[in-house]
């Protein structure tokens, strides 16, 4: 049982597995990876090795999960590296709902975590371009999740110019329950809101609202991938899938693969980013676009994944926006980022956002080459 997080009871596990044709079970083992709110179990049986996942309550509904599964099936049919979803015993589909919980069952993929090598970093960019290319014409089922910009269960969403992000920043700054640190939270929240607003305005001036939208991953980072010999063998976790301009995915990937941290105390994290990895990732994406063109010479590169000058110039500002958005949501809800002090984490985010803003010209020159 994973310490301090959600877990499966023995009765729950038996009920869920009864809906799948796995044969005689040899071993059941908890997998402590990813969110502690999402329990995972590795099941070894006579039919193979599988991964069972229970989605957190209130995260999404059956239509949204069904759409994510349709995307994964589409990618699998195009030989894109994703884990294979297993249908239920009655073959009604890949989404199982029991007692207000939603479960997913996958064939287990063997692989290793991201090793930071230039080869692996470039491949993550390359595969993101392929991901975008394969999904450029993919649309929700007519009875599936709405593409409207408001309402429960919608897919059109991004971290850019978000009223939700602004609301959470204001919540962090206004919460007077944090005795002794209220003023410090207020100062850092106001600074982050200013940086966020400035970046949003500049991205909008570069034409964001006119850019084509399509299905994007929404959480393209090292923890959601498995590798073998520096190549991706599985892209995992489609929980954040949405419809938005591809530049949002690209900027988030550039951020996730170039951010420098890892020390226990966020105060010890440096301001700077790994510029070499940032460019390796971006060049991998460019290579992926070229490869798709070579593989499909009669098929034009979709407008959504073209790296126009304005899209390239927006990437650093979009990195600032996604970094602030990702940090503030959990801090507003709990006062912490994972197990880390929310105040210390937001102070670190402010330093890094200011570094990106200060170095915009240098970074954009390298990005546009």
Image (cartoon, rainbow, N blue to C red):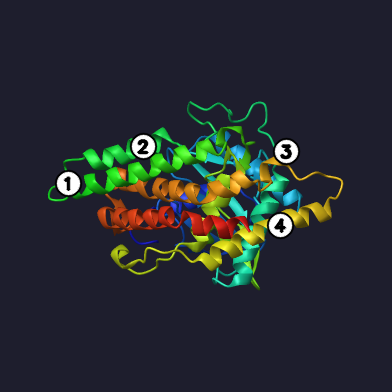
- What residue did someone put label 2 on? 166
Query: Considering the numbered disc 3 on the image, is that residue within a helix, a strand or a loop?
Result: loop
Compute the Cα span from label 4 to label 1: 47 Å
Spatial CA distance of label 3 from label 1 is: 49 Å
Name which of mark 2 and mark 4 comes first in the sequence. 2
Residue 47 spot, x, y in % from top left: 67, 61
- Which element carries disc 2, helix, strand or loop? helix
Residue 21 vertical placement versus 202 (above, below) = below
The foreground one among 193 and 368 is 368
Q: Earlier in the sequence, mark 3 or mark 4?
A: 3
Q: Position of residue 231 (x, y in %)?
A: 66, 67
Pick the quarter of the image with the N terminus.
bottom left
Mark 3 is surrounded, within 10 Å at the Cα level, by few (under 14), some (14 to 19) or many (20 or more) other residues, namely few
Residue identifier under label 3: 137
- The disc at residue 183 is 1
Q: CA distance from mark 2 to mark 4?
A: 34 Å
Q: Are marks 1 and 2 in contact (CB under 8 Å)?
A: no
Q: CA distance from mark 1 to mark 2?
A: 18 Å
Dots 2, 4 in contact, CB < 8 A? no
Give yes or no for contact between labels 3 and 1 (Cβ–Cβ under 8 Å).
no
Q: Where 247 sits versus 80, above or below?
A: above
Residue topped by disc 4:
288
Residue at disc 1, secondary structure = helix
């Amino acid at each position: 049982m994973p310490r301090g997080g959600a877990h499966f009871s023995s009765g729950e596990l038996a009920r869920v597995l009864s809906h799948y044709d796995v044969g005689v079970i040899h071993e059941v083992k908890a997998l402590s990876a990813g969110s502690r709110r999402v329990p995972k179990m590795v099941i070894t049986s006579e039919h193979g090795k599988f991964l069972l996942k229970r989605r957190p309550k209130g995260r999404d509904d059956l239509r949204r999960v069904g759409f994510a599964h349709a995307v994964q099936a589409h990618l699998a049919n195009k030989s894109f590296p994703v884990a294979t979803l297993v249908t239920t015993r009655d073959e009604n589909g890949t989404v199982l709902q029991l007692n207000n919980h939603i479960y997913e069952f996958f064939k287990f993929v063997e692989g290793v975590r991201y090793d930071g090598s230039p080869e692996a970093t470039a491949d993550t960019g390359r595969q993101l371009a392929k991901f975008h290319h394969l999904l450029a014409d993919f649309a929700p089922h007519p009875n599936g999740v709405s593409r409207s910009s408001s309402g429960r269960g919608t897919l059109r969403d991004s971290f850019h110019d978000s009223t939700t992000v602004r609301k959470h920043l204001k919540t962090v700054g206004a919460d007077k329950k944090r005795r002794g640190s209220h003023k410090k939270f207020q100062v850092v929240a106001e600074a982050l809101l200013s940086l966020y607003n400035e970046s949003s305005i500049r991205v909008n001036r570069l034409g964001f609202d006119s850019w084509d939208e399509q299905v994007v991953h929404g959480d393209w980072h090292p923890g959601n991938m498995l590798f073998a010999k520096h190549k991706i063998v599985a892209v995992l976790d489609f929980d954040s899938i949405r419809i938005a301009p591809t530049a949002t995915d690209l900027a988030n990937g550039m951020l996730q693969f170039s951010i420098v941290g890892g020390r226990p105390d966020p105060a010890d994290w440096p301001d700077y980013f790994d510029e070499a990895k940032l460019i390796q990732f971006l060049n991998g994406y460019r290579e992926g676009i070229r490869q798709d063109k070579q593989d499909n010479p009669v098929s034009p590169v979709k407008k959504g994944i073209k790296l126009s000058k304005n899209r390239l110039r927006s990437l650093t500002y979009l990195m600032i926006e996604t970094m602030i958005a990702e940090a503030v949501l959990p801090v507003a809800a709990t006062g912490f980022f994972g197990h880390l002090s929310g105040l210390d984490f937001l102070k670190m985010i402010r330093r890094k956002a200011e570094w990106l803003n200060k170095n915009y010209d240098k970074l954009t020159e390298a990005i546009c080459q």
